[in-house]
Amino acid sequence: MHSRRILVALATLLLASPRVGAGLPTADPPEMPVAHSLAAFRQALQSGGPGKDGIPSIDSPRFQSAVAAEDVLEDNDKVIGLYADGEARAYPQRILVWHEIVNDEVGGKAISVTYCPLTGTALGFERGDTQLGVSGKLVNSNLVMYDHATDSEWPQILGVAIDGPLAGHGLEEFRVFWTTWGAWKARHPDTRVLTEQTGYVRNYQRDPYGSYNPRGGYYLPQSSRLFPVMAGSDRFPPKTEIFGFRTEEGAAAITRDALREETVVEMPLGDSHYTVVHDAGLDTGWVFHNPRRAEVSIDGLRFGPEGVTGAGLEEFERVNAFEAMWFAWTAFYPDTRVYTGEGMP
Amino acid sequence: MKAIAMMVAMLVKDPRMLALIVLVTLVYGGLYLWLNGDISGGGTGGWQAAFPAWERAFEARGPFQFEPVGLIQVGTLVWTFSPLNTLLALMMGGLLGLAVAAGLKVWKAPRQCGLSASGAGTLAGIPALLAGGACCAPLVLIWLGLPIAGTVASISPLLVPLALVILLVVLWRLAKSLTSSTS
């Protein structure tokens, strides 16, 4: 009887989240909403054109100093920034557009920085002992990754495996920043920057889809999407950039203009409450779980390398968030709450 | 096959036909490489060439699409050079050049039966061009704003073989009508 109890306790411990799925840190159940069934996601999978690893991930990234990067980056060029354990890194968008995934290591932790050009989304994931790769498939135009350990398939925005041995599990995320080179180096002057020495030959001066500096081609807000979606909404032009976050209780999006103008946005979601703070330096947001609805004023906040501090925010749990094109966000989260600046959503 | 070989031998003996074949090969080959993204803009002026990745020459990026091994920049043009993509582009261009030259020869001949085959030969190059465009950067679809990249991507593995088969059938038909009109 006693040994049976120990076995039950062990089984409970093994099933508790987070846990490691074949070397990959995952959570079961996932910590984010899954609006469609996994079967529906699998049915909506599309070939993106290139085959598996046809868009090759960068597995041995090389970095240069911010001073050296000045020769190849303009202030308004988009970068994906990462800060962890006192180390800052910038991954230029014009390199990631050709690779979509960088399997990197920061502060002794194995991570993947991922970017999907077709949905304008950058997310960071912990990868444990394995690596993430580009499957060549898309769902809602979004990059579908696979892990080398189990070959499970993970749409990037969803962060949950839709196929393979880890189907239904969620990846462990960490925050990365979709910002500009000028803003990132101002916040992190000692940042290291990914170089073009990727091990592959690509024309890194050219983005095959368009341009962010200045904005053009596929990235224009009113331009059409290329692939079908599971759910559509005409509320905003398809490529309008929104700032979104999701929890087990649902998803919420804020228009960039509303966030910039109001600087602090209160968002109820499910039975809970969240405070979103605008970071003018990086032109992005920070999301905090604020269940007691404590008042937060932008005047009491300080923005530095470690993030946003002050006004008691240290006591709140930080929630991951990221920018995305509207058509993709609403395709994954058709029931999303949306805040456009007219008051409480 | 023998008829095609005889036709090719006859065409390349004619300097004007040979020039036409070379011209079509180069124009089509360049267009194919531009549509599949190997040749593009973004160069910063001047010229440079580096070939750091010969070991990737046979690595596939997608159906009939291979990894570049080097980068050649001339002015604003950048060519990420893949030997196999280039070979494929020139092969398709060469077959199309032969079809156009043979079609012209048949058209000039007394019998009219080659006219439709000549047109078909020219059209035969289109699937391969689509294949190039469908693979890595759906440039044309972005310009046109068409949400059909999924459809094009799903049929892209068939486009190059389809173009090859059409071109060979057209060449065979042209070779037959050419040999019968000259005999």
Image (spheres, coloured by chain):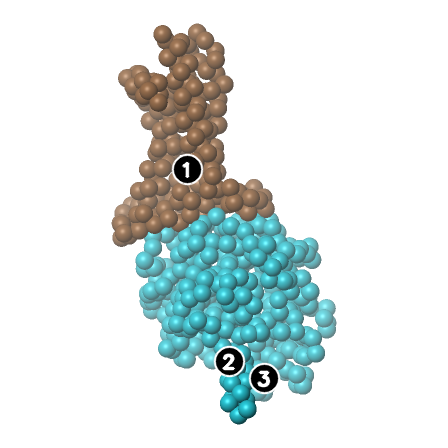
Image position, residue A38 (x, y; %): 60, 62
Chain on which label 1 sits: B
Say which label, 3 or 2, has the lower sequence index.
Answer: 2
Image position, residue B61 (x, y; %): 40, 49
Give the structural element (helix, strand or loop) at label 1: helix
Q: Colour of chain A?
A: cyan
Q: How many dots with numbers?
A: 3
Q: Estimate how packed mark 3 is, as few (under 14), some (14 to 19) or many (20 or more) residues with alpha carbons within 10 Å.
A: some
At horizontal 62% and vertical 74% (from top left) the residue drawn is A248
Chain on which label 3 sits: A
User: Are the residues under marks 2 and 1 on the same chain?
Assistant: no
Disc marking residue B19:
none
User: Mark 3, mark 2: which one is toward the viewer?
Assistant: 2
The amino acid type, in three-letter code, at marker 1 is Tyr
Chain on which label 2 sits: A
Q: Estimate how packed mark 1 is, as few (under 14), some (14 to 19) or many (20 or more) residues with alpha carbons within 10 Å.
A: many
Q: Which residue is mark 3?
A: A316
Whether residue B95 is visible to the viewer of this picture, yes or no, is yes
At horizontal 38% and vertical 78% (from top left) the residue drawn is A107
Image position, residue A257 (x, y; %): 63, 65
The amino acid type, in three-letter code, at marker 2 is Leu
At horizontal 51% and vertical 80% (from top left) the residue drawn is A14
Disc marking residue B32:
1
Left or right of A184: which side holds A257?
right
At horizontal 37% and vertical 12% (from top left) the residue drawn is B179
Q: Which residue is mark 2?
A: A14
User: Mark 2, mark 1: which one is toward the viewer?
Assistant: 2
Q: Colour of chain B?
A: brown
Nearer-the-camera pick, A222 or A181: A222
Whether residue A121 is visible to the viewer of this picture, yes or no, is no
